[in-house]
Image (cartoon, rainbow, N blue to C red):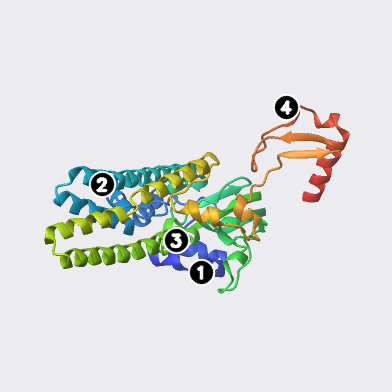
């Protein structure tokens, strides 16, 4: 099997041609030997993570700030001039600021890694005629995958069978409404991604019906893998706070250098020794630097991150808290995109009576309670009618 076949517009090909190109059996799937060869050729069904910075580099980047540069230079000059105590104090402030920023960033990285681990899925495949459940990472191009309601699509599939199959593709296309699939259709080559009814894409969710498809792309070759690559190459933008601090630091630097130069000039005109003039200029420069500002900003942002964490929000960079705090309006027309298309009723109010509903997503788990006690909906006619009307609307 040629690796270039993974770039074929599969939605545009008839089923027979898809099966021939992938050298697979639409009923028995791949045999064990074919699976091993393709796993060796294409690797695991994983999206290659962007290589992160080493701990040392992430720690050193905490010093990448104009104010920090000024403080470091001031501490070095102060140390050279035999004032070790003042130099140690200045450097201590810089070090505490860097440690706080590094610890928070490391904590966020660990939380994101743990979240990624929870998203590893399983897949039901047919191999050599036997149906088995495997980790989605073990899939290979040409594998025959079975789908049913509640499954997350493990790879990009060309559907070969679909029985009232509906898939929510909000994670990929932004469309919150499930899309009805049809395996027998052959689409135009330039059909947009959201309209490819004969395809099922990785990371989307089966909401209804059953189906089967042949794996045509795995890992980075999937549509969601391409999105991941685009995100990895996105430019990192500065937040309003970091831009303001950078501007303030630049203005402060010019002001300090100007004052230091004037101080040396005045002292020289007064006939004082050059070393005394230099010491006075350095003292003026150090006193003009707000050495507590970086630490105060870092501590303030760290408090904001901690509060967000208690509300289950993961923030990787400290300055992002300030950006979120400055946000006044969020515009969105895709409810399913924000909620993973798993909105859940939590309370039902009928004729002044409030009922709590437990459970989440599409899992058929949970109960209805009233004042903390489980109830039988049949004992509440108004509640029962409300539930029946909701079911009727869905149908």
Picture quarter containing residue 241?
bottom left
Q: CA distance from mark 2 to mark 4?
A: 56 Å
- Is residue 349 shown left or right of residue 170? right
Q: Residue at x 19, y 63 (%)?
A: 267
Mark 4 lies on residue: 372
Residue 395 placement (x, y as % from top left)? 78, 50
- Is residue 16 shown left or right of residue 333? left
Mark 3 lies on residue: 231
Residue 9's disc is 1
Q: CA distance from mark 1 to mark 4?
A: 54 Å
Q: CA distance from mark 2 to mark 3?
A: 36 Å
Mark 2 lies on residue: 91
- Indicate which label's residue lies in the foreground, 3 or 1: 3
Q: Residue at x 60, y 62 (%)?
A: 198
Q: CA distance from mark 2 to mark 1?
A: 59 Å
Residue 125 placement (x, y as % from top left)? 51, 47
């Amino acid at each position: 099997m040629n690796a270039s076949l993974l770039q074929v517009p599969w939605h545009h090909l008839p089923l027979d041609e898809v099966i021939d190109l992938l050298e697979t059996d639409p009923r028995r799937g791949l045999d064990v030997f074919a699976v091993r060869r393709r796993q060796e050729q294409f690797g695991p069904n994983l999206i290659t993570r962007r290589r992160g910075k080493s701990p040392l580099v992430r720690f050193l980047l905490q010093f990448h700030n104009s104010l920090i540069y000024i403080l470091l230079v001031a501490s070095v000059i102060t140390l050279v001039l035999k004032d070790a105590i003042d130099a140690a104090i200045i450097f201590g402030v810089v070090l505490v600021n860097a440690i706080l920023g590094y610890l928070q960033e490391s904590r966020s990285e660990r939380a994101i890694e743990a979240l990624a681990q929870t998203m590893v899925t399983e897949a039901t495949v047919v191999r050599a005629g036997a149906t088995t459940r495997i980790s989605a990472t073990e899939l290979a191009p040409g594998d025959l995958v079975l789908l049913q309601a509640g499954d997350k699509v493990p790879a990009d599939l060309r559907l070969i069978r679909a029985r009232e199959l509906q898939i929510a593709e909000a994670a990929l296309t932004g469309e919150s409404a499930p899309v009805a699939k049809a395996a027998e259709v052959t689409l135009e080559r330039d059909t947009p991604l959201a309209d490819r009814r004969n395809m099922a894409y990785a990371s989307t969710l089966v909401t209804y019906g059953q189906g089967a498809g042949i794996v045509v792309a795995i890992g980075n070759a999937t549509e969601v893998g391409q999105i991941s690559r685009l995100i990895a190459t996105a430019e990192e933008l500065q937040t309003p706070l970091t831009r303001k601090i950078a501007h303030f630091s630049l203005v402060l630097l010019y002001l300090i250098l100007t004052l230091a130069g004037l101080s040396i000039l005045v002292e020289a005109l007064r006939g004082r020794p050059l070393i005394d003039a230099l010491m006075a200029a350095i003292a003026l420069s150090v006193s003009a630097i707000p050495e507590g500002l970086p630490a105060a900003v870092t501590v303030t942002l760290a408090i904001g991150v901690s509060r967000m964490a208690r509300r289950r929000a993961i923030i990787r960079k400290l300055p992002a808290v300030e950006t979120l705090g400055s946000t006044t309006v969020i515009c969105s027309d895709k409810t399913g995109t924000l909620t993973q298309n798993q909105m859940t009723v939590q309370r039902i109010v009928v004729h002044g009576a409030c009922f709590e509903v437990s459970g989440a997503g599409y899992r058929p788990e949970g109960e209805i309670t009233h004042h903390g006690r489980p109830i039988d909906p049949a004992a509440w006619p108004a509640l029962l009618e409300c539930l029946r009307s909701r079911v009727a609307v869905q149908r």
